[in-house]
Image (tube, helix red, strand yellow):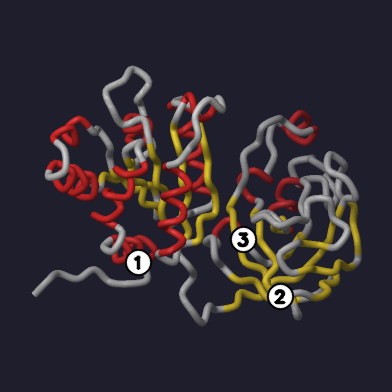
């Protein structure tokens, strides 16, 4: 259980949030009147009052809203909560959607202190149930009564696609197939064949958004720019070779060129990452191989089911 110590909003992006005694929370939007509200996954930002206090004890002297946070709550270590955790505050229900954030440019706090806690301690949430929150209101964790929908991202790797010289047909086809299977596709990205860029997004999606599944398409061949497998392996915590092996084995019955695919399948944290070929047809054939099987693997990664051997 925690207590709200500050509510902060700003009328325009790029301006510091200021203290408010209350806020009206709108479903799938955020705080009414806040510039960062919108139909996206980072509708409300939260920060632990305890973490702010510890930071101020080092001489930071920051006021509520200085980190860009909407809610400051005492008694919660938000960083320790998983994506999908539900937070109840009076009539308002929030669902955590992201842990931490990327810091693209150092803020004034970092310039002064050489550190900023928001990138590692701040979390983001979306509004599931509306209502007012006031300073002093209690916040509690609310247990889930039903399983959370599988969440996935699709990344297309293509220099020509990223440059607008070729239509991406594989990414949308994969996303449609996932949605038909009941997945929520939270992000679709079209990137150039840049291993550093791919690694950054894989880490972000696995660590901050804590997605269940990431499917990449393209960059798995023998070309000099085909570096998707190397980038994927470099961010892996554990190997999961069976999926990639099954794709190649099945594809060999269709075309001997399947032996030239270098796609890999790995695990980072609780996220399964699978490389798919570049063509829409090959992607669909690959998904035929594993789509009905991997929900058990995703349940194991979430920790919602015990492993079991066939008898």
In the picture of the structure, the residue carrying the numbered disc 2 is: 129
Please give the label number shown on residue 173.
none
Using the image, determine if residue 114 lies above or below residue 268: above
Query: Residues under labels 2 and 1: Cα distance?
Result: 27 Å
In the picture of the structure, the residue carrying the numbered disc 3 is: 77
Where's residue 134, x and y in %?
85, 72
The reply to whether residue 50 is visible in this rendering is no
Please give the label number shown on residue 299.
1
Look at the numbered disc 3 and give the secondary structure of its residue: loop
Query: Residues under labels 1 and 3: Cα distance?
Result: 25 Å
The quarter holding residue 309 reads: bottom left
**119 vs 259, nearest the viewer:** 259
Residue drawn at point x = 76 percent, y = 60 percent: 72
Looking at the image, do the residues carrying marks 3 and 2 touch, with CB atoms under 8 Å apart? no
Look at the numbered disc 1 and give the secondary structure of its residue: helix
Residue drawn at point x = 47 percent, y = 24 percent: 159
Looking at the image, is mark 2 or mark 1 earlier in the sequence?
2
Mark 3 or mark 2, whichever is nearer to me: 2
- Other-residue count near label 2 (Cα within 10 Å), few / some / many at <14 / 14–19 / ≥20: some
Query: Residues under labels 3 and 2: Cα distance?
Result: 22 Å
Residue drawn at point x = 54 percent, y = 65 percent: 84
- Say whether residue 147 is left or right of residue 163: left
- Quick one: quadrant of the N terminus? bottom right
- Say whether residue 107 is left or right of residue 246: right
The reply to whether residue 131 is visible in this rendering is yes
Looking at the image, is mark 1 or mark 3 earlier in the sequence?
3
Looking at the image, is mark 3 or mark 2 earlier in the sequence?
3
Where's residue 195, x and y in %?
43, 27
Where's residue 274, x and y in %?
33, 45
- Other-residue count near label 3 (Cα within 10 Å), few / some / many at <14 / 14–19 / ≥20: some
């Amino acid at each position: 259980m925690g207590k709200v110590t500050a509510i902060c909003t700003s009328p325009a992006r790029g301006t510091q949030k200021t203290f408010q005694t209350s806020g009206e929370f709108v479903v799938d939007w955020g705080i009414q009147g806040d510039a960062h509200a919108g139909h996206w996954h980072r509708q409300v930002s939260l920060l632990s009052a305890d973490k702010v206090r510890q930071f101020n004890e080092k001489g930071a002297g920051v006021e509520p809203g200085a980190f860009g946070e909407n809610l400051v709550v005492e008694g919660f270590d938000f960083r320790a909560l998983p994506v999908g955790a539900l937070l109840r505050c009076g009539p308002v229900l929030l669902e955590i959607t992201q842990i931490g954030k990327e810091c693209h440019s150092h803020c004034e706090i970092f310039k002064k202190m050489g550190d900023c806690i928001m990138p590692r301690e701040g979390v983001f949430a979306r509004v599931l149930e509306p209502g007012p929150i006031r300073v002093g209101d209690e916040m509690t964790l609310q247990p889930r009564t039903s399983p959370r929908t599988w969440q996935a991202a699709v990344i297309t790797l293509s220099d020509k696609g990223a440059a607008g010289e070729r239509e991406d047909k594989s990414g949308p086809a994969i996303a449609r197939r996932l949605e038909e299977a009941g997945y929520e596709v939270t992000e679709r990205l079209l990137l150039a064949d840049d291993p550093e860029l791919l690694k950054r997004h894989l880490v972000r999606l696995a660590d901050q958004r804590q997605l269940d599944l990431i499917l990449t398409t393209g960059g798995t061949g023998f070309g000099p720019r085909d570096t998707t497998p190397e980038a994927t392996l470099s961010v892996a915590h554990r190997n999961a070779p069976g999926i990639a092996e099954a794709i190649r084995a099945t594809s060999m019955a269709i075309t001997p060129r399947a032996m030239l695919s270098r796609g890999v399948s790995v695990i980072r944290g609780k996220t399964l990452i699978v490389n798919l070929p570049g063509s829409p047809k090959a992607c669909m054939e690959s998904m035929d191989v594993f789509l009905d099987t991997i929900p058990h693997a995703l349940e194991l990664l979430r920790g919602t089911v015990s492993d079991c051997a066939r008898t």
